[in-house]
Image (spheres, coloured by chain):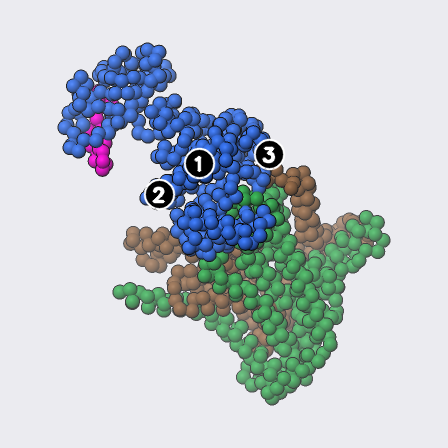
Chain colours: A brown, B blue, C green
Amino acid sequence: MTAGAGGRPGAAGRFASAVFGIAVLVFVLAPLLWLALRAFAGSWTYPHLLPSQWSLRWWSQVWDTPGLTSSIRLSLIITPIVTVLAMIVCLPAAYAIARYRFPGRQLVLMTIFATNAFPRFGLFITMASLFYSLNLMDRMAGVVIVQLIGTIVFMTWIPAAAFAAIPPSLEEAARDAGAGALRTFFTVTLPLAAPSILVAVILSFLAAFDEAQGTFLVGSPDIVTMPVQMYSLIGNYPDQVAAVFSIMLSIPSVLLLSLVRRRVLGGTIAQGFTIR
Amino acid sequence: MTTTLQLHNITKELGGNRVVSDLSLDVAAGELVCLLGASGCGKTTTLRMIGGFLTPDSGRIVIDDEDHTATPPEHRPTAMVFQNYALWPHMTVAQNVGYGLRLRGMTKREVATRVAHLLETVGLSHRADSKPVAISGGEQQRTALARALVLEPSVLLLDEPLSNLDAKLRVRVREQIRALQQRTGTTMVFVTHDQEEALALADRIAVMNAGRIEQFDTADAVYRHPATEFVARFVGTMNLLDCTLTPGSAKLDDGTLLPVTGPVEPMSSSGATGRVRLAIRPEDVRLDDPDGTPATVIRQVPLGHYREVVLGVGGVELRAFTGAATATPPTVMVSASRAVGYPLAPA
Amino acid sequence: MTGRRRLSERTRGFLLVSPPLAVIAVFIGLPIAFGVLYTLGYTGGFNDTISLIAQHQSTGWGIGAYRDVFGDSLFWRSVRATVLVTVVSTVLVVGLAWLIALQLRFRAGRWARLVAGVSVLPMFIPVVIGANAILSCYGSAGLFRTVLHALGWSEPPVFAYTVTGIIIGQLWTNLPFAVLMITSGVQGVPQNLLDAARDVGASRWQRFWSVLLPLNTIPTIIAMTFTVISVLGSFTLPFIVGPTAPNLLGPLMEGTYSALNRPQQAEVMSVFVFVLAAFASVPYVWANRRAARGVA
């Protein structure tokens, strides 16, 4: 036992915890920092820890790379469409799952789970065949659908858990005070659930924005979004160009993450996945 | 079993606040002591230090003449009944009770025998295979008690064990705990904010306030002779009147003389007079004293076997309990048969 | 009155959940159904176009496509690699997530919170970028080799384009979800339950084994199931970080589908992966049912 009576770590425990923590931090952060460093490297040869020359020329070169700007534009068009579509399709269902008791409710939950239970790439392979027949291959609509599939779980389960966590008595009190059903929903229920819905929206946005494998399969060769562009950048262009593009692709994620960091760590996602 | 427990000058800070301050307590063998106080007075912190879940910043905890200040809870001869019981939800009642025995390397059969015996003692044999969620609050409480008792601890610690039970059940379990304590002779420390519980259960009560013990004495003494004004206010119902004490009566601020026929503690011994805050129990207020001062009845509340009467005397309110079956007349002659006086800071 | 309200609540419920169910039915249910039919040789219905494009397919009811795929040793080498990566990464992910959760719970403080917070970061990094970052960090000129070289190892290993590299990447990308699930569960265990175990003499290990772990079976199983499914269904990471062949089933499917233009065989592999995932989901379904019954 290294712990004292209060369960506080002894010196050995603190040391172990520090070493473990540093290992985790290095494991997670080092690849990202290494990649980021690359974006500013003029020349960099193994086995030097730092580049021998710094340069910003890759940042301007990115814009000259064919297809890059169009992929950025495409991503910025498609992702909001997918996110709004996901909200329209899923939020009412989330409310129903949380509030209404209807036969087959459990089945609905399991079905939505099943969208995640199919290994993604296998699913995309079968979808592609259908898309050929529906003439959705290499079309924007096809890409939107592929990305929408990845947002359904976030957009139903997390808001459903949030709606379920609101005591029905709060809604009843509003109804009691004379508010109609819709008014109650928009003035009481929605504001209370809003923080969790925001988390769901952001996760859905990122899921759509970052979706690469399905978009690659269904959208190629014409619908090339930013992450799909990465496939061809890696290996075909100087590492530095891929690094610069990676940073640009991460910007939305990092910005949005900082918005909801505390909620995500506070269990909003975990709560969503244990709803019954 | 003759376990004694001593706390010597215990001090504990939590989050920058001094929660327990230079506290000493001496619990005799086989005694049931209550730590009584409002929330935040440090009673639970004190109990958790006795159990080993917190380490005092300074001071010593001695159990049976052995210093246990730094012993972790798993090696302490204490057992705790937690507030909310802290039953392990994934284990049955029998598994909850038997877990500690299994850790001690007993065979399955030995554990089963002991658990069955103890469950019978607390009347839970029929619930042995139920999960905690499936049994009532009272049954959960007894499971927690059995889990603590099965290890035959030297000192049993109870943290508000009755606060989650309804009023009737609380009285019954209280009596069961008392009976159990008398049978086993286990030394017990019991934390509660409910003074009635403390008065009914404890051999001695330690009334706590702001991390200190205000008074440590028998239930009777705490009730009849509150050592400090805090105790007087906290335990039972008490009238508190600022007045000037003269021999035989208390002169209220508007000049009314309230006769005090009995002793005024502790002043009476020294024969003190002057400005005091006088504490009078409602049952010590006489309503039919021919030599008393006139008082008007403001309201009266029948409370079953007694009634509470609120009186107006010399511009202040005075509460009285009377056993009279009939309603009190609108005007009565009032005196106090006993009182306790506390020094009043000069205004 | 109540009868009418019930009825309308039921109808409303059905109406509101129907849009996502319709999307799922049309774009997941339908393709899977026709996919399975296609693997069995059915080329009608929605399979008409794909079967026109495909090269080398078995038509007419039969298991010819399965025979094709299962007779190929490259497929089985991919299966072996996929199962190996899945098992090893899942064990590592869940184990590491537990350590982070325990540290957060018992070493509470800024440091533990920072470690837990950072470990969730990859969830917000596009997988493509994560894969690229892993590739360059563990590549021949990567940070990993550079540091080992500096420490005196003249020829340190290269993990880029290896199965080990895929495992490292899977650990990196799947850690966040497991950390979220397990930390949330571990944080939710009341301190009293642990204190009570301590009180009856349980050591640290015993408290973990007989209180903390059993109370977190469900989050642990959820984390495991989703990690298994995510690894089985991954394409980007093995595609970028893995070796040419045998790689995992994801890249093999893509190659079979696009480069070889054999969609029927690719769909056979999909069905195979679905079956693997179905087995992996059994504990999850079991755990959820147990939770629904309130046994916790």
Quarter of the picture containing the N terminus of chain A is top right
Q: What residue is pinned by disc 2?
A: B172
Q: Secondary structure at mark 2?
A: helix
Q: Position of residue C202 (x, y in %)?
A: 58, 46
Dot 1: few (<14), some (14–19), or many (≥20) neighbours within 10 Å?
Answer: many
Position of residue B284 measured from the top left corner of the image (x, y, whole percent):
26, 24
Query: Residue type at mark 2?
Result: Arg
Q: Residue at x 35, y 56 (%)?
A: A183
Question: Secondary structure of the magenta portion, mostly?
Answer: strand
**Quadrant location of residue B66?**
top right
In this rendering, position of residue C292 left or right of residue C273: left
- Per the rendering, the mark at residue B190 is 1
Residue C5 is situated, as x and y percent measured from the top left of the image, at: 31, 65
Q: Nearer the viewer, residue B229 or C159?
A: B229
Give me the chain letter of mark 1. Answer: B
Q: Quadrant of residue C233?
A: bottom right
Span shown in magenta: B298-316
Q: Earlier in the sequence, mark 2 or mark 3?
A: 3
Mark 1: which secondary structure?
Answer: strand
Q: Report in which chain the residue with disc 3 lies.
A: B
Vertical placement of residue A268 versus B262, above or below? below
Foreground: A10 or A152?
Answer: A10
